[in-house]
Structure formats: structure tokens, C-alpha cells
Amino acid sequence: MIRMDLKKKLKYEILFWKRENFTVKREVWDWIVSFLVAAAVYFILMPFVLGTSAPAVVVSSCSEAGHLNIGDVVINQGTPISEVNAPEVNISSLNYITPIFENNKVVAINFSGNIVYRNESSDIVTYLAVPSRAQIIHRVFAKVNYNGQTFLITQGDANPFPDQMWIQNGRGGWCFDDNNGLCISTLVNQKMFLGKKIGPQIPIVGHVKLFFCDVMPFCDGHSNLGTGYEYKLWC
């Protein structure tokens, strides 16, 4: 009898505690605290630890299909651009640089006799395109030392030619230092460079951001060009 009374009393006290503590006000406060903690981690802690203003970016197109998928979250490490892993070439001029095609895709670049082949072991980097300022997540095709500076030529693994190249109506050219609007970007310099991918990507999680960026026209959350804010689940 005493044991049953204790059980009833304990059950009543648990129900009373739940009713008193898990109120709407408490629930809203918990959400606010969780949001503030997450914001502090993303905007303060991660940039400090990883050395970049873009420590985590979301893949939103299929330009890296086969390696990255829509909704993947890529973790970036900020580094000097000279420390990016990619085939390296020294040049004295931006002239006489010729793409080499195979099956309608650029697989190598001839730098005045020095041929550099696209290498899938090169780093995947995030940078701000010029002039659009869009965040691009593509692999480095070549690291170019020119005029005392280091630049990157980049290309999405699923794209037919580099970001700094254009082809239209049977004609083509490079956007090394000036973008005519037909290229994704000019050569990537240190100021444009946001970081290189480290560790494995986190799948699916980025769909939360992409969904809200799709329904909110003021959101610029897409990290790659090519989707036009069309929400897609998979490549």
C-alpha cells in the first residue's frame, strides 16, 4: 500500500514538473538559446579555428557531380593560396595559353609548351567569383605563378571547361584578368580565395539551407552557379 502511494506521488510530481517547466515560453527560450549558440559557433568559433570567413559552405549545383552532391556541406580551411595542392606552373605572360580538349572537355592546358593535366587529387576550393561575388566550389586545375603572385585556374569536375574560359558560337577565349560576362570568374587570387576543402563532406544537411534559400528570394545561400535557385534533391 505504501509502495503504491509512493508510485502515485512520484508520477504526480513528474507530471506536475513537466507541466510547470515545459511551457511555450520555456520552449521558445530554448530555441533562442540554441540558435544563438549555433550562430556563435558558425560566425565566431569556426572562422577563428579554421582561419576563413566561410568555414562551412553548401553545394547547390552538380558541377562537382561524382565528388560532391547537392546538399553536401563542405568544411573549408583558410590557407595562403600558395599552399593549395595542384599542378604548378611558372609563366611570364598570359598569352599563348591553349586548352587541350578530349571528348569536348578540357583535360589539359598548354602553357607555352608546359602542359598541365587536370588532376582529381588536386584541392577543391571555395572562392568569390569576379565580378559576380558568388561563392564557387570547384577543383583547382592549375596553380599559376605570374608577375610575383599566385593565381588559380579552377574547373568543376563535371564542367566541360575551366571557370576562366568561355566558348560561344564556335569561338572561345580566357577571362584571366577581365571577365566579359561569359566566364564564371577571372583568375582566383588570394583576395578572392576563401579556403580549401578539408575532410569528408557532410551529406544532406545542407538541404535545410537550400530549401529556405529557394523559398526566400533575398537569400543568396547557393554556393555554386548553375541552379537558378531551382530546388533539387540530387544530381
Image (cartoon, rainbow, N blue to C red):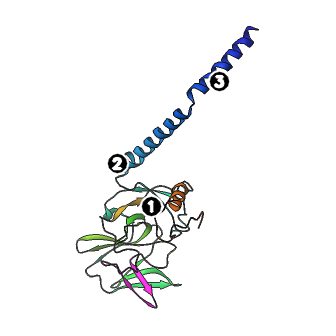
Residue at the spot 61% in from the left edge and 26% down from the top edge: 19
How far apart, in angstroms, are the residues tagged by discs 1 and 3?
A: 44 Å
* Secondary structure mainly formed by the magenta segment: loop
Q: Position of residue 119 (x, y in %)?
A: 45, 72
Magenta part of the chain: 161-190
Please name the residue that numbered disc 1 is placed on.
Answer: 218
Please name the residue that numbered disc 2 is placed on.
Answer: 48
How far apart, in angstroms, are the residues tagged by discs 1 and 2?
A: 27 Å
The amino acid sitting under disc 1 is Phe
Please name the residue that numbered disc 3 is placed on.
Answer: 15
- In the rendered view, does 156 fall on the left or right side of 81? right
Residue at the spot 34% in from the left edge and 73% down from the top edge: 187
- In the rendered view, does 169 fall on the left or right side of 233? left
* SS category of the residue bearing label 3: helix
Give the quarter of the figure containing the C terminus: bottom right
| Label located before the other in sequence (1 or 2) | 2
Query: Between 48 and 22, which is closer to the camera in this rendering?
Result: 22
